[in-house]
Amino acid sequence: MYTAEIIIMPLKELLDPQGKAVEHGLKNMSFSGMSNVRIGKFITIEVEAATEKEATEKVETACKKLLANPVIESYSYTLKPA
Amino acid sequence: MYTAEIIIMPLKELLDPQGKAVEHGLKNMSFSGMSNVRIGKFITIEVEAATEKEATEKVETACKKLLANPVIESYSYTLKPA
């Protein structure tokens, strides 16, 4: 059993409207010196697998086919034995 | 200048409908052995601050006042010199 921690972020080249909105929010609330806000997703999944290799393959496929949209997002993940 | 990486997750005690939806999606796509999916937010912010203490205070306040909803979410963060 492994716990996968997956980070999915909007690609750096693209505008991140949610991040921009939060950045304006911070400015409006007089938080100074905070910029370049980017907002993505953090997903934890428990993966049943005998080996780390098997778990990696499962998570990689899940990211590619369901979790991330490769046109606008990049993903990275770490696996920990649970 | 510091880069803050903030993780905001739904509290463990609460149902996470988005996570449940993804879990069903994975099952429907015949990904076996993946359970307990929880989905939160991953936020990166560039923080201008002279010391790590000052940066920590800024990020802590931003989390409390704008980024996280303490009723349903928990937050954690790390700071890296940029």
Image (cartoon, coloured by chain):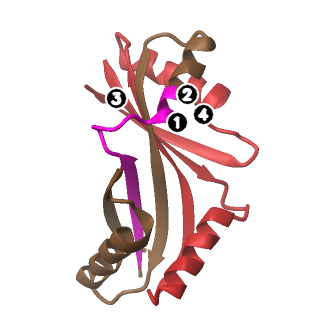
Chain colours: A brown, B red
Within-10-Å neighbours for mark 1: few <14, some 14–19, many 20+: few
Q: Residue at x 34, y 29 (%)?
A: B3
Would you name the residue on which mark 4 appears? B67
Between disc 1 and disc 3, the foreground one is 1
Of B32 and A14, nearer the camera is A14
What percent of the width, then of the height, locates residue A42? 47, 54
Q: Residue at x 43, y 71 (%)?
A: A66
Relative placement, left or right, of B46 versus B40 is left
How many angstroms separate mark 2 from mark 3 (CA)?
19 Å
Magenta range: A2-20
Would you name the residue on which mark 1 appears? A18
What amino acid type should be assigned to the residue bearing mark 3? Thr
Extreme residue toward the front, this view: A71
* Residue A81, quarter of the rendered image: bottom left
Within-10-Å neighbours for mark 3: few <14, some 14–19, many 20+: many
Q: Secondary structure at mark 1?
A: helix
How many angstroms separate mark 4 from mark 3 (CA)?
16 Å
What percent of the width, then of the height, locates residue A22? 55, 28
Q: Residue at x 51, y 42 (%)?
A: B76
Of A28 and A5, nearer the camera is A28
Question: In the rendered structure, are the residues bearing label 4 and label 3 in contact, judged by CB atoms less than 8 Å apart?
Answer: no
Relative placement, left or right, of B70 versus A36 is right
What percent of the width, then of the height, locates residue A26? 56, 19
Whether callout 2 and callout 4 share a subunit is answered no
What amino acid type should be assigned to the residue bearing mark 1? Gln
Would you name the residue on which mark 3 appears? B3
Question: In the rendered structure, are the residues bearing label 1 and label 4 in contact, judged by CB atoms less than 8 Å apart?
Answer: no
What amino acid type should be assigned to the residue bearing mark 2? Ala
